Structure formats: structure tokens, C-alpha cells
Amino acid sequence: MANTLPNINILFKQRAATFTQRGGVAILILKDDTDKNFNTAEYKTLTDLELDEAKYTPTNLQYIKDALLGKPSKVVVVRVDVEKEVTDALNIVKSLYTSGWVTLVSETKADHDTLVSWTKTRRDTDKKTFKSIVYDPTTTPDHEGVVMLGNTKVTFKDNARGQKDGYEFLPTLLGYIASAGTDIGTTYMVMENLKSVLEPDNVNATIQEGKLVLINDENVVKIGLGANSLTTFTTDKKEDFSLIEVIEAKDLITDDIRSIFKNSYLGKYKNKLDNQMLFIGAVNTYFTGLAGRDVLDSEFENTSYINIEAQRQAWINSGKAEAKEWDEATVKRNAFKRKLFLAGNIRILTSMTDVDFPITLE
């Protein structure tokens, strides 16, 4: 029996059902010459890592343990020789993965600059949903895909390490942020391996500069606000885009829709209005499922639809000037060659952080 479009509804329902259970992948770049016989390794637990302890220097081994502390879905170690560049490691990441949280441990600004640039290219040009965590790059990334740590000093609970520069905490932060997914927010998430941090003189001002700040609160260290480095807001990237959990949800939704379209729709169905509407209906059912799981706001009309103006412009650019005068129904009926022009309008729920709750006592 031939495949039919309604099967896509089932796939979308399955994705919606498991949405909040899918933690992110933590990709940790390390330079290590201890064992040059591998470039990547994946670990889900400390038990997995114990089998490979001899492959790393003690310092790098601790970084991997730090990344596992937050319990991400897995930690991917990308190892390159000490003499190699960060670009060499990022080329490995690009060739093997399409998404994930990436960081490195380096005191060199240029390394963090490279990771910032790479992340922006992957997201803005390649449309991949990589995100990264950096420390003290030359300029503020100002991008929703890049988190920038704003603490210069952290103090670990273990006496062997004590106080360290902020960049040495990036593996721990990587694991915690990757583990959060869409189920919980990162704001006020406790960093279990820290005793204290050196806070900026003005925490709120530092956050407004696009930095993630760790704070000392009730004898524990917490993430003050789960924010990325985006500080320039537009009609396409509003203030919500500066929240880690919003971008995480948006990225997972984007990946789900692209994956199902690519594997279950692309090349199997003719590009005509009826088939487009069936796919849109399946996407809207998926949105309904996400609203039922508190990923999207159930009080909002989360919907996908044909992007009329983008499709009209495609016809105009191809030489069909009369498309300027088409009404919306005509634009919809005239699917553009092999391409679908779809858009969506959704409202992603975020964790409660601010409470305005006056109390009157008599």
C-alpha cells in the first residue's frame, strides 16, 4: 500500500508526545594528545567514562565529568591534537552533527571568537540549530545562538581546584544548559559543583549586556537569568529571543518540522495546494500537542500557514509580473515549482521568574 499524507500526522503526534523528554546534546571540544587514535567519543554516564579514563589528561577528564554533572542526554567529546586549531574541531562537529550545545575550554579570546563566528554561520546560513557557550570574546556576540558567561571567577567545592577563571566552568555550564531542554528553565538552576562565584559589580547591568551571570543565593550558586547574548531586538527577533528556553523550544520545533518534511514528505508528494494544506494541518496538530504539554500557550492560536507574500514574490522574481495583482486565493492555488513557502505564529511558554504579588496585612 502506498504511503499517504495522514501518516505524517502520526509522526508529528509522536514528536509532540516526546518533546519535553528530549534533552540536548552537550558537545565539548578538548585538546589532548594522550590518545590520538580517536576524534570523538560519547558518554551518557560516569560509568561510560570510566572505561576511557586513560584516554585523557586528568584535567580534561575532570572537564568531561563536569559536563556530565548536569545529566544532558549525552556528552560528545571532540578531541583534537594540542597543536590543532579550534576550527579543526569545529569541522568535525559540522561533519557529524546537525544540532547541539557546543563549548570549549580556553583562555584565548580568539578561540571563543572562532566559536561565536562558527555558531552564527551554522544558524544563519546553514539553518542548523547549534548553540554555543563562550567566555570573554572580543566583542559581544549579540546572538540568540550564543550564551556568554559573565563571571570572571568561580570557586569549586573540591579543594583540589578551588578558585578558577570563568572559562574553566564552561563544561559544567554546558551540561546543565543542555540538560534543561524545554521541560525546565535555566533561571535559578543550581550549579552543584560550585561553592561560590565572584559576581559582577552590577548584576542586572551585566545581564543587559548579553551575559549569563551566576549568582550567590542562599548558600548555593545559581544561574541568575537563563539568557543568551542577544541584545538587539527587531520585529523578527523580539525580547523573548534572548531567553535560552525560548530558543531551545523554537529550535526543537524547527528540527521536528524539517525532519518530518525531509524524511516523510520531500520527493513523495506533488507540490500543490491540497498537499500543502494537508502538511499544514499536520503541523497544526503538532502545535496542538505541544500546547497540551505546556510547551506552547494553549490560550494562543498557534498556527502554520502558507506565506502568501513570499510565494507571490517568488513568482514575480521568476518573471510572472501578473502575480502582483493576484488575490490571496490565487496565490495559494499557484504553488511555486518545487518550493513550499510556509510560515508560523506560535507563543512559547516560559518559566515563571518575576512575581508581582501584593499582600495586605490587617
Image (cartoon, rainbow, N blue to C red):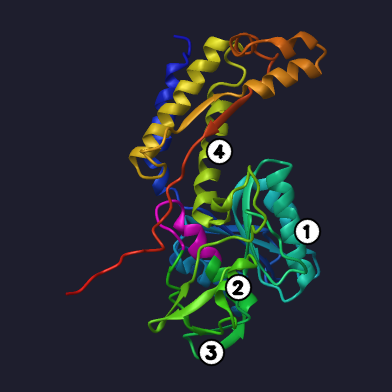
Determine which residue is flagged by label 1.
Answer: 87
| Viewport quadrant of the N terminus | top left
Q: What amino acid type should be assigned to the residue bearing mark 2?
A: Ala
Tag 1 secondary structure: helix
Q: Residue 205, image x and y in percent?
A: 60, 73
Determine which residue is flagged by label 4.
Answer: 254
Left or right: where does residue 333 sit relative to residue 297?
right
Q: What amino acid type should be assigned to the residue bearing mark 4?
A: Thr
CA separation in Å, label 1 and label 4: 26 Å
The residue range painted magenta reads 174-186
- Could you classify mark 4 by the number of other residues whose Cα lies within 10 Å: few (under 14), some (14-19), or many (20 or more)? some
For image coordinates 72% across by 56% down, the residue present is: 90
Tag 3 secondary structure: loop
Q: Earlier in the sequence, mark 3 or mark 4?
A: 3
For image coordinates 33% across by 38% down, the residue present is: 292
Q: Earlier in the sequence, mark 2 or mark 1?
A: 1
| Viewport quadrant of the C terminus | bottom left
